[in-house]
Image: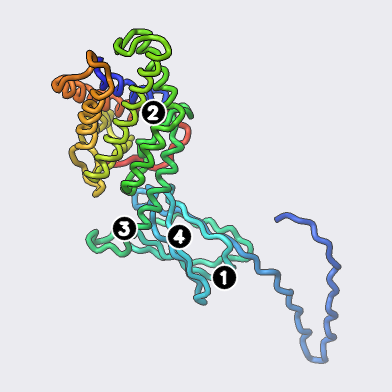
């Protein structure tokens, strides 16, 4: 029996399950008010100024449609030039400054493809100031970007996005790391592509699914060359886990790094049902490049062929695929990816508790 049948089923299995304090003090003594002089006015007493407590400033950056903007640079300055701090908006578009001295302040917000925005205000003593949404307008000329993200900043934003993706588990159990619900995520670095692949293959659920699959294969005497008993089960388990490691690393890390392609599925979530079905099916043969443009999914297609070829090194001789069968199974794998994408588009999000609350992507 061909390896790719099992790899596709394994992928589908992942998709289907997949400060208040009390103070003692003295009663303040009132300063006696001097008696008014004849024909004069009694001087008024002035209240003593209270302590100046630090506060915080937070807000959310959105685009003209209301979708959050991740990776926007937010600069905070004070009128007396005593303050100069920068942060990047997170994957939810939010930013925050803590331990800020009270007084007038100004925010400058910039992001790739958007016009720079400024916001001024006054922070009062001890205030937690949550600003209204800061809406960025699209730059008049996209080729003249005011401020772009540096390479280091892109890596930082991508790391934040990956942390969110690693929380995505179908039914709170099955890992669903290779799906992005963010409209326009930052491209992954080669290191990050390998990190996601590694975390996928060492996830406890991966070991459990491979073990269950090996048990079914042994019960049905698939790959009979492995025999039965503990030894046969161990060989089936080893072959199945090797399939998972090889296909994941070749198709989702090695080739995407060499070809500069993104191995993730980008959730659409909007439009007619027909358009979403076509989008999901098309994503079995196309993908986004690191330049954020759609292109043929060479990584996925060649990855399936390469994994099939490698499997001939360790499967029983009578179960190894010939060249023709390897290509045939690669085609079946593409079909399996299309079905998995349909589940992602219409089912999986509803079964995933921790999904970033972002507007859907527009292809």
Look at the image and tell me whether residue 278 can be seen.
no
Q: Secondary structure at mark 2?
A: helix
- Name the residue located 48 percent from the left edge and 66 percent from the top edge: 85
Q: Quadrant of the N terminus?
A: top left
Residue 253 image point, x, y percent = 30, 39
Label for residue 103?
1
Quadrant in which residue 244 is drawn: top left
N-terminal of the two: label 3 or label 1? 1
- Spatial CA distance of label 3 from label 1 is 30 Å
Between discs 4 and 3, the one toward the N terminus: 4
Q: Is residue 104 left or right of residue 116?
A: right
Spatial CA distance of label 2 from label 3 is 31 Å
Earlier in the chain: of badge 2 and badge 1, it is 1
Judging from the image, what secondary structure is the residue with disc 1 in?
Answer: strand
* Distance from the alpha carbon under mark 2 to that under mark 4: 33 Å
Residue 134 in the figure: left or right of residue 100: left
Which residue matches tag 4?
A: 87
The tag earlier along the polypeptide, 2 or 3, is 3
- The answer to which image quadrant residue 217 occupies is top left
Q: Are marks 2 and 1 in contact (CB under 8 Å)?
A: no
Vertical comparison of 280 with 111: above or below: above
**Residue at numbered disc 2:** 348
Front of the two marks 1 and 4: 4
Instruction: Name the residue that disc number 3 marks.
Output: 112
Q: Is residue 55 left or right of residue 321?
A: right
In the displayed structure, 66 sits above or below 58; it is: above
Observer-nearest of 256 and 31: 256
User: Where residue 198 sits: x, y (%)?
Assistant: 38, 37
Front residue of this view, candidates 226 and 19 = 226
- Marks 2 and 1, how far apart at CA: 48 Å
**Around disc 2, counting alpha carbons within 10 Å, would you say few (fewer than 14), some (14 to 19), or many (20 or more)?**
many
């Amino acid at each position: 029996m061909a390896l790719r049948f099992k790899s596709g089923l394994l992928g589908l299995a992942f998709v289907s399950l997949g400060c208040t304090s009390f103070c003692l003090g003295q009663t303040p003594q009132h300063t006696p008010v001097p008696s008014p002089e004849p024909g004069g006015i009694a001087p008024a007493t002035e209240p003593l100024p209270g302590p100046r407590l630090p506060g915080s400033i937070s807000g959310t950056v959105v685009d003209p449609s209301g979708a959050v903007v991740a990776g926007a640079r937010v600069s905070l300055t004070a009128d007396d030039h005593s303050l100069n701090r920068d942060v990047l908006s997170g994957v939810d578009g939010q930013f925050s400054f803590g331990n800020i001295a009270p007084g007038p302040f100004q925010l400058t917000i910039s992001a790739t493809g958007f016009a720079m925005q400024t916001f001024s205000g006054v922070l009062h003593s001890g205030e937690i100031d949550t600003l209204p949404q800061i809406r960025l307008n699209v730059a008049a000329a996209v080729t003249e970007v005011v401020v772009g993200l540096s390479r280091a900043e892109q890596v930082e934003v991508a790391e934040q996005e990956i942390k969110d993706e690693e929380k995505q588990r179908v039914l709170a159990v099955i890992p669903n790391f290779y799906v992005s619900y963010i409209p326009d995520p930052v491209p992954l670095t080669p290191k990050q592509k390998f990190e996601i692949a590694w975390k996928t293959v060492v996830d406890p659920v991966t070991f459990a699914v491979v073990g269950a699959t090996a048990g079914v294969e042994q019960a049905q005497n698939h790959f009979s060359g492995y025999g039965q008993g503990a030894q046969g089960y161990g060989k089936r388990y080893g072959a199945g886990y090797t399939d998972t490691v090889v296909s994941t690393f070749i198709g989702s890390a090695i080739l995407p790094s060499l070809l500069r392609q993104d191995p993730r599925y980008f959730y659409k979530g909007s439009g007619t049902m027909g358009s979403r079905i076509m989008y999901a099916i098309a994503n079995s043969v196309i993908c986004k490049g690191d330049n954020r443009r759609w292109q043929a999914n060479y990584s996925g297609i060649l990855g399936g062929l390469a994994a099939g070829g490698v499997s001939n090194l360790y499967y029983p001789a009578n179960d190894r695929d010939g060249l023709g069968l390897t290509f045939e199974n690669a085609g079946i794998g593409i079909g399996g990816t299309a079905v998995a994408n349909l589940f992602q588009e219409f089912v999986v999000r509803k079964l995933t508790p921790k999904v970033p609350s972002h507007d859907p992507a527009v292809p």
